[in-house]
Image (cartoon, rainbow, N blue to C red):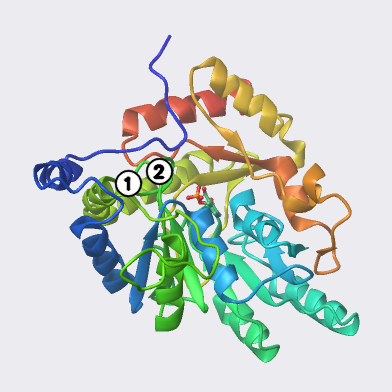
Amino acid sequence: MDERIYLSPPYLTGAEEKHVKNAFAQNWIAPMGPDIKALEAEISNSVGVKHAVALCSGTAAIHLSLLYLGISPGDTVLCPSFTFIGSCNPVHYLGAEPVFVDSEQTGYGMCPKAAKRALSELDKRGRLPKAAVIVDLYGHPANMGALLPLFESYGIPVIEDAAEALGARYKGKMCGAFGAAAILSFNGNKIITSSGGGMLLTNDTAMAEKALYYATQARRNAPYYQHTEVGFNYRLSNISAAIARGQFETLAHRIAVRREHYNAYAAEFDGLPLDMMPVSPDTEPNYWLSCAVLDKNCGVSPQELIDCLEAHNIEARRYWKPMHLQPLHSGRDYYTAGDGDVCGRLFDSGVCLPSGSGMTPAQRDRIIEIIKKKITGI
Ligand SMILES: Cc1ncc(COP(=O)(O)O)c(C=O)c1O
């Protein structure tokens, strides 16, 4: 059996080691320390926001952003349906309800036309959402130019879920710099990983201070531990931050490799009944995952293609199953632009292909050959 090729495994370049060794040498292995501070400074400077708060996950970062925005039981939060469930689980933690919105055909981000419809309908029903989560899916920036002014016109704060999009840009501005707050994930499969972790980014000093306070069990400043509110144990460990610092140093290389994967797949599949995920105008994705959609007349379903790759010891994955199709969310509001269920169709036809920063051209060629053979039958 050939060696296994994973979808997006962790990729270590060696740059991590010096930071980790240093942290060990200085006994900084607690959930506080110089690497946490350094990581926060390095990422906030690079993204172009004032504050960063390193946390144990991207989900925690969304939770704390929503908490700061005052989301509470009975509220609604607008979320894209087409995303990983971490984008909207925190809405439930706060006893609020997500309302789902369809995606655009390019970039797969929240569809502005569908969002406009949702807001106008919800406004009529007196149920305007108290916040919106916008996701940069698969490393492709959402349509910020249309979405941000729309939400602003209703006075609704936006959280940018850039969990998958560190290093991507919209009109030259880095993902992670949009909205009232943005979040990143350093989970094991992301473009940089700290083994597990996340970050809240914001220009709002009060929000950053409050997030840090909530992330450290809501300890009041007193000579003893004094508590007036419920808090959480959400801080990132210094060792994880040390790993993330080494990973972040090589972000440009990671993006270049993943872009090359996308371009090679696109060139090799040209003329076949499968299309790579279209890149939206004004965007520079980080190409976290190379995604492809199979034509209806392709004769091969996404699952058949995934099974075929699996038989060759290659991991591929279906597109995220939209939130409005999840049993957990059955019966919840879902708004499309009025001309069909775009993300439902994408789910039925999409496949995420291996995209790792450490995947070699030879490994990629192996994948391409298997896919071509499966689709053409020769
Ligand atoms: C779009 C999206 N949002 C949120 C998350 C949650 O991040 P984490 O796994 O760090 O909690 C992830 C990934 O895991 C994600 O892909």
Q: For mark 2, does the 10 Å Cα neighbourhood hold few (<14), some (14 to 19), or many (20 or more) residues?
A: many
User: Is residue 371 toward the left or the right of residue 101 in the image?
Assistant: left
Q: Which residue is mark 2?
A: 261
Q: Where, quadrant-wise, is the N terminus in this rendering?
A: top left
Determine if residue 175 is in view: no
Residue depicted at x 44% and y 41%? 189
The answer to the question of whether label 1 and label 2 lie on touching residues, with beta carbons closer than 8 A, is yes
Q: Quadrant of residue 306?
A: top right
In the image, 198 versus 218, the foreground residue is: 218
Can you give x and y, in whole percent of width and height, for residue 152 in the image?
63, 87
Above or below 371: residue 155: below
- Quadrant in the picture for residue 184: bottom left
Q: Which residue is mark 1?
A: 257
> Callout 1: few (<14), some (14-19), or many (20+) C-alpha neighbours within 10 Å?
many
What kind of residue is marked 2?
His
Which residue is located at x 85 percent, y 65 percent? 339
Residue drawn at x 38%, y 51% as measured from the top left: 259
Instruction: Point out residue 266 in the picture as x, y percentages from the top left corner.
Output: 49, 46
Q: How far from the left and from the top, in percent, is residue 236?
A: 36, 53
The residue at label 2 has a CB less than 8 Å from ligand 1: no
Residue 304 located left or right of residue 317: right
Q: Kindly identify the residue that appears in the image at 57 percent across and 52 percent down.
A: 277
